[in-house]
Image: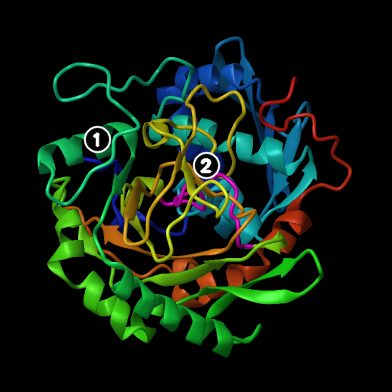
């Protein structure tokens, strides 16, 4: 079974000048994928997109069922202004529409942030040939040809072929009984220790604000290096066997983050909304990795269980929220202490806020090996330092938005 969705080589990424993008790359993409992108834009009823870089601009719009490009911004429902390096990253999938907003590299002067991110799957249709998801595109079929039971859970003793097939079809797994309570208690103690040591400016933690206005650390970055108890478990065969269920040669990333999920959080990156891990970009270079959640305390409907949308890893759809028109239905993965959840990096998932008791979880995972002939270079926009700076991402997104927009294009609303 394979979950490898990569279509680009990292060695091919270069700094594209604005005029090359406007005069060559986009026209060439239109010559190949204008109908596919136009169909997607029409299906999503997306406003025309204007792109401005310095003193030059263009607009992408649908003309019937196809997409066309015109000079200038006349008729553009959403206008994004950016520097040439940001445009280069956008068209090469080095950063997504939301990724540019999260890193303060785009400013919307017409339309709103929802209309801007609505264009992400459309741009991927235009530039990468990925059809925008439409209702009915995805079915779930078991190895026996019968409908797949999406409520199924597994144990490490179950058939690996069935586990791999389920992951490829559904985009997630729930593995029961991997670690025991004493092992999880040791990891929980380490999380508590590092949460207590965290400070808002340490660059090694994320913070959130509760309903009483109290700021508190909610995520310990670089936890793999900090917790010997976790390293012993992650390096054991009880965890490492997961990398073999796909046949794609996944490798452990050698990293992890320890999370606490307190009650009453109202601001900050604690209870993350629906998103894909590739929502900032680089789907075509890295997906699909396997993100593994180790249930340190277990999670249910009142303690903030993980939510997933089965099949969303196979859907070219909005990656930084749940489009309410999406026909794929969410599920909540209720776990016991010591269970592991797995989701593909391009599966839509969310952290449900706990309402009765908090919980703890550790996230680690497995990435794909380099494609043959590729040269993988570290991307500073996805470095440890850049990840640490995401604690203020909500403010950055708000700053990129157009305050005069009327929010007409919010996904799922009548347009």
Identify the residue at image location x=26%, y=65%: 179
Between residue 116 and residue 146, name the one nearer to us.
146
Q: Give the range drawn in magenta.
A: 269-282
Q: From the viewer's perspective, is the residue at label 2 or at label 1 nearer?
A: 1
Identify the residue at image location x=25%, y=43%. Answer: 4
Could you tell whether 25 is left or right of 226 in the image?
A: right
**Within 10 Å of the Cα at label 2, are there few (<14), some (14-19), or many (20+) other Cα atoms?**
many
**Left or right: residue 62 compared with residue 386:** right
Between the residue at mark 2 and the residue at mark 1, the CA separation in whole angstroms equals 22 Å
Residue for badge 1? 166
Q: Residue 80: x, y in percent?
A: 70, 45
Q: Can residue 380 be seen in this view?
A: no
Q: Looking at the picture, tell me which residue is in the foreground, 322 or 178.
A: 178
User: In the displayed structure, does residue 344 sit left or right of residue 71?
Assistant: left
As drawn, 211 above or below 301: below
Q: Is residue 107 magenta?
A: no
Q: Is mark 2 on a helix, strand or loop?
A: loop
Q: Is mark 1 on a helix, strand or loop?
A: helix
Q: Quadrant for residue 158, please give it.
A: top left
Circle 2 is placed at which residue position? Answer: 319
Q: Is residue 227 left or right of residue 280?
A: left
Relative to 223, say whether 69 is above or below: above
């Amino acid at each position: 079974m394979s979950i490898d969705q990569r279509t680009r080589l990292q060695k091919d990424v270069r700094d594209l000048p604005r005029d090359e993008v406007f005069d060559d790359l986009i026209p060439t993409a239109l010559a190949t994928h204008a109908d596919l992108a136009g169909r997607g834009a029409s299906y999503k009823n997306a406003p025309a997109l204007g792109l401005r870089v310095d003193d030059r601009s263009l607009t992408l719009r649908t003309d019937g069922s196809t997409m066309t490009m015109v000079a200038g911004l006349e008729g553009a429902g959403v206008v994004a202004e950016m520097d040439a390096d940001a445009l280069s990253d956008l068209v090469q999938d080095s950063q997504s529409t939301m990724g540019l907003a999260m890193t303060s590299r785009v400013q919307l002067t017409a339309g709103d942030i929802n209309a801007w991110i609505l264009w992400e799957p459309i741009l991927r249709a235009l530039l990468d040939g990925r059809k925008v998801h439409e209702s009915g595109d995805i079915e779930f079929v078991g190895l026996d040809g019968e409908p797949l039971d999406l409520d199924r859970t597994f144990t490490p003793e179950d058939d690996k072929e069935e586990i791999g097939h389920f992951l490829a079809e559904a985009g997630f797994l729930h593995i029961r009984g991997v670690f025991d309570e004493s092992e999880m208690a040791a990891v929980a103690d380490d999380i508590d220790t590092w949460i207590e040591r965290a400070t808002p400016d340490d660059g090694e933690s994320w913070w959130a604000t509760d309903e009483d206005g109290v700021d508190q650390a909610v995520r310990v970055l670089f936890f793999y290096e900090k917790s010997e108890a976790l390293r012993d478990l992650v390096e054991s065969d009880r965890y490492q066997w997961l990398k073999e269920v796909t046949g794609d040669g996944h490798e452990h990333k050698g990293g992890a983050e320890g999370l606490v999920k307190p009650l009453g959080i109202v601001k900050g990156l604690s209870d993350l909304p629906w998103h894909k891990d590739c929502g900032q970009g680089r789907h075509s270079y890295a997906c699909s990795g396997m993100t593994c959640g180790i249930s340190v305390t277990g999670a249910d409907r009142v303690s903030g269980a993980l939510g997933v949308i089965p099949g969303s890893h196979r859907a070219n759809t909005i990656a930084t929220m749940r489009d309410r028109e999406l026909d794929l239905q969410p599920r909540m993965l209720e776990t016991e202490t010591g269970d592991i959840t797995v989701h593909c990096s391009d599966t839509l998932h969310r952290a449900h806020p706990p309402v009765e008791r908090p919980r703890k979880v550790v996230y680690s995972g497995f990435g794909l090996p380099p494609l043959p002939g590729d040269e993988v270079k570290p991307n500073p926009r996805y470095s440890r330092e850049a990840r640490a700076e995401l604690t203020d991402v909500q403010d950055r997104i708000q700053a990129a938005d157009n305050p005069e927009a009327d929010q007409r294009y919010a996904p799922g609303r009548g347009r």
